[in-house]
Amino acid sequence: MKHAGAEELDQLESLLVKLRGLPTLREKSRGVFYVRSQAFLHFHEDPSGLFADVRLSPDGSFDRVRVSSGPEQARLVKRIEEDCAEGSLN
């Protein structure tokens, strides 16, 4: 899977706006988010859709999450918000 290009990130702009609004996340370059100094989330494109690699596992590894649809994007934002609220991303 290759990293999402500008056209794919354009498709995710409403998701990117929501992620930019989360105080714990810092966007280092378009579509690449960090928590403190550690990479946290970035996007990939694949013939089967768009995906986020996001570091939400307790072991610190990346999970691949499909984000092609609005409901998929909403689930990702909700999960990140919950982790922020629990303090696991601070």
Image (cartoon, rainbow, N blue to C red):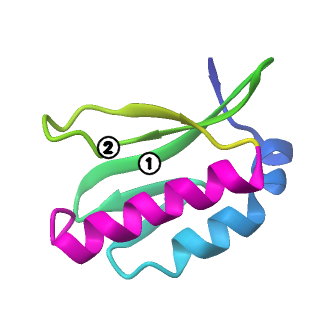
Q: Which residue is mark 2?
A: 55
Q: Nearer the viewer, residue 37 or 49?
A: 49
Question: Which x, y percent locates residue 12?
Answer: 75, 55
Mark 1 residue type: Leu
- Magenta stretch, main secondary structure, is helix
Q: Is residue 25 left or right of residue 37?
A: right
Mark 2 residue type: Arg
Q: Is residue 84 left or right of residue 72?
A: left
Q: Which image quarter: residue 10?
A: bottom right
Task: Kindly tell me whether residue 43 is visible in this rendering.
Answer: yes
Name the element at disc 2.
Answer: loop
User: What's the mark number on residue 41?
Assistant: 1
Q: Nearer the viewer, residue 25 or 88?
A: 88
Task: Kindly tell me whether residue 30 is visible in this rendering.
Answer: no
Q: Which image quarter: residue 84?
A: bottom left
Q: Are marks 2 and 1 in contact (CB under 8 Å)?
A: yes
Q: Is residue 32 left or right of residue 62?
A: right
What is the spatial separation of the Cα atoms under label 2 and label 1, in whole angstroms?
A: 6 Å
**Quarter of the image containing the C terminus?**
bottom left
- Neighbour tally class for label 1: few under 14, some 14-19, many 20 plus, Cα within 10 Å: many
The magenta region covers 69-90
Q: Which image quarter: residue 60?
A: top left
Report the residue at 39% width, 70% height from top: 81
Report the residue at 67% width, 63% height from top: 15
Name the element at disc 1.
Answer: strand
Residue 49 in the image: above or below residue 43: above
